Image: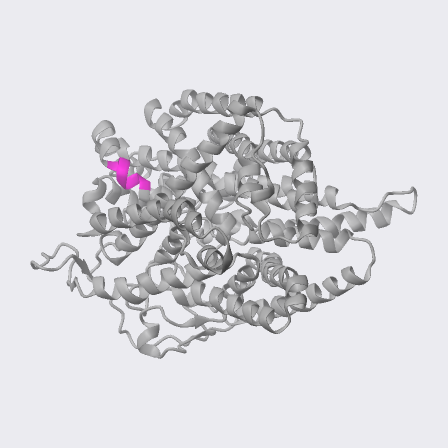
Amino acid sequence: MLLKILLWNSASTPGWSLPAVLISYIIIKLFVKIASRWTEILPLSKYELVVIQTVTVAITSVSLGMGYGTYMAAIQPNSAANYAGYTYQQVLADPTIFDKLPYKVVDTSFITLAAWALCLSFTSVNLVTVLRKTFIVRYRLPFPSPSATAVLISSFTEKQSEERDLKIKAFIKYGGLFFLWAFISWLFAGQAYYADSGISGCSAFALPIFGLAAMRYEWFVNFNAENLMYSGIAFLTPRVVNFSTIVGSVVFYGILYPIIYTKGYAVDNAGDEIPEGYWFAYGGGTNYYSGMGGYAVFFMICCVLGNGAYIVIDMLKVTIVSFIEKHNQSEENFFDGLSNAEIREEHLRTKIMEESTINKWFLIAAFLISCIAGVVVIPFLFPIKWYFVLVGYIIFPLIAVINVYLVGLTDQGITFLIAKGLIFAFGGWIHSAMGDYEAFPTLMIFLGVVAFGSQNSADIMGDYKTAYNLKASSTSMYIAEMIGLVVGCFISPAIWLLFYRSSPDMGFDTSAFPVNYAPAYIGVGHIALDGFDALPEKATTFGIVFFICAFLSEPLKDYVLLKIFKTGRINKFIQDFWPNWMVMGLYAYLDPGDYALPTVLGWLFCEYWTYKDRESANRLKYIVGSAIIVGVTIFGVPQSFLGLASVSSPMCMTAWPTSDGSLMEGSNDIFDLTYY
């Protein structure tokens, strides 16, 4: 199911932990019911379910990291020929076309893909296992979807009680409601697509509550089920995350982008000269990253990396002190604001996590061995120098830490966006070292080294969070992860080759598997070979300012403001409403209507519920939030089966303006910053 989605539209993949739990539970319950006729079988436990879910997610995370719909697709012969304007029929008539392409292509085999996966899969699991306590206990990151997975597993396995019945009733009520709404949303998803992108243009539930003029600047509310899922996430995330969401949207989409847009100049052709006083051109086939999209992506990366740099430094400090002094920092400060019962529960969970028999030095050694193996092997698999692979391995842990932290806060992973931004920093160096013909595939493989492990790290840490909530053993989770990754390294390439053999025209626009996002990666890769010079004017200046602000914001809060106001209402206000620049940076890219405002609606509803009935809200808000996420996500299972059967949504409705007032190709809004 995952590969079917990746090879058609890599931008839209459902989370797999919740469907894995549901399908596993149904299959095993059916097996137990049949087998119990001949022998006695113990009831299914939450520990067995979480192990099954972990193995399944590990397998799917390999497929996501392999880049079948992104960087790996961009260097395949078919995608390259399609981008160059050739058709599949022309390639069949003249196979030498592949030799005439402007850059080197790679026709990957099973052995190549399996070796690539083995080189990159095990770095992430060893890195994350070392850092699991830091993310889960020290930073108390909520990890909304993994927490919802834990709630779902508990609902299947908990013993009968009045409290359990109350929670199950609320879970089924809201989960069923949003499952139904996901089905209704799918009915109206239609088959209208933006030109050149393959993204659905049907927005039946995107309502212009601020007016049509504001809607063209992305200010609307999308009540589609997939977007309302962020309302459920808001139930599980801290107040500071939800507040930072709206602050980021207001700062960027409400103030900065409308101002920057006035500095754009409309051209008829991409090569037209821009008059003095203007910063960038739009229209006439101009590239996304040289216009408003370039500002959005670069601003997001600078904010995320700036805040992430402080987190990495803080984490290194704590980790080094822990290793040198051979004792753990007191956990009491980690659980500020919790009740005594909640603190006892957290201590028990932490104790179970720490009982892991996996030695930290073993994990570090395994991580280093995996990196060395990758540096040696990968240059034999793809056209890339060993020192580029080494740089990728050095950068990957930093990006992984930042991505895990962001996923833990917001449930939004941006590994591939950060990696695409980073290739602007290294594109010029790679271009000068490899030459015109080999520079592009080298750049894509470099992107893959960084993105593969970072993507897996967030998935694996989410599994550890699920296990933590369920009081499952970290050792069993580590073993389950290793099993899933090993299996995924061989199953994933095998299934991809089955798709390729069944559709030899894969990658062409006329194919059943057009790999719609390969052209986007080819385009951004060629632009990145020019380095930062490819970005629009003033982007780097703004980016440096945002990086500095993001880097200094957290230490200013932690070491100045919270030291001055150690207790009381001001201390609580600072902790709740001091904007988090990493979250703000995410919403420099994600638009308000589809992401930020649904999140804010959920947050406001949760605050109102707490105000009216604090006891009920404290008991059930995590259950309700989890139910919303589960209801929407579980619908991805039948939706995926419908996709496999080539069954599409029957209707298309939209609240977008129907006249062509667009100033960017392929959309009806002023600056569609999430175009790729």
Residue at (77%, 51%) from the top-left corner? 157
**Is residue 542 depicted above or below 532 in this figure?**
below
Can residue 449 be seen from the camera position used here? no
The stretch in magenta equals 422-427
Whole-percent x and y of residue 74?
36, 42
Seen from the viewer's position, the closer of residues 367 and 386 is 367
Q: Report the residue at 33% width, 74% height from top.
A: 214
Please count the marks in the image. Answer: 0
Q: Nearer the viewer, residue 549 or 449?
A: 549
User: How far from the left and from the top, in percent, is residue 143?
Assistant: 55, 50
The scheme the figure's colours follow is: one colour
Instruction: Single out the residue that lies furthest toward the left.
Output: 276
Q: Vertically, is 433 above or below 273?
A: above
Query: Relative to 568, does residue 652 appear above or below in the rendering?
Result: below
Magenta stretch, main secondary structure, is helix
Residue in view at x 74 percent, y 46 percent: 46
Note whether residue 581 is visible.
yes
Name the quadrant of the C terminus.
Answer: bottom left
User: Can you give x and y, in whole percent of width and height, for residue 50 in the image?
Assistant: 69, 44
Q: Is residue 363 left or right of residue 589?
A: right
Q: Quadrant of residue 136?
A: top right
Give the camera-side residue of 369 and 191.
369
Q: Nearer the viewer, residue 543 or 553?
A: 553
Return the x and y of residue 642 as percentages of the image width and height. 58, 60
Residue depicted at x 50% and y 73%: 651
| 659 over 248 or under it: above or below | below
Q: Is residue 352 left or right of residue 38?
A: left
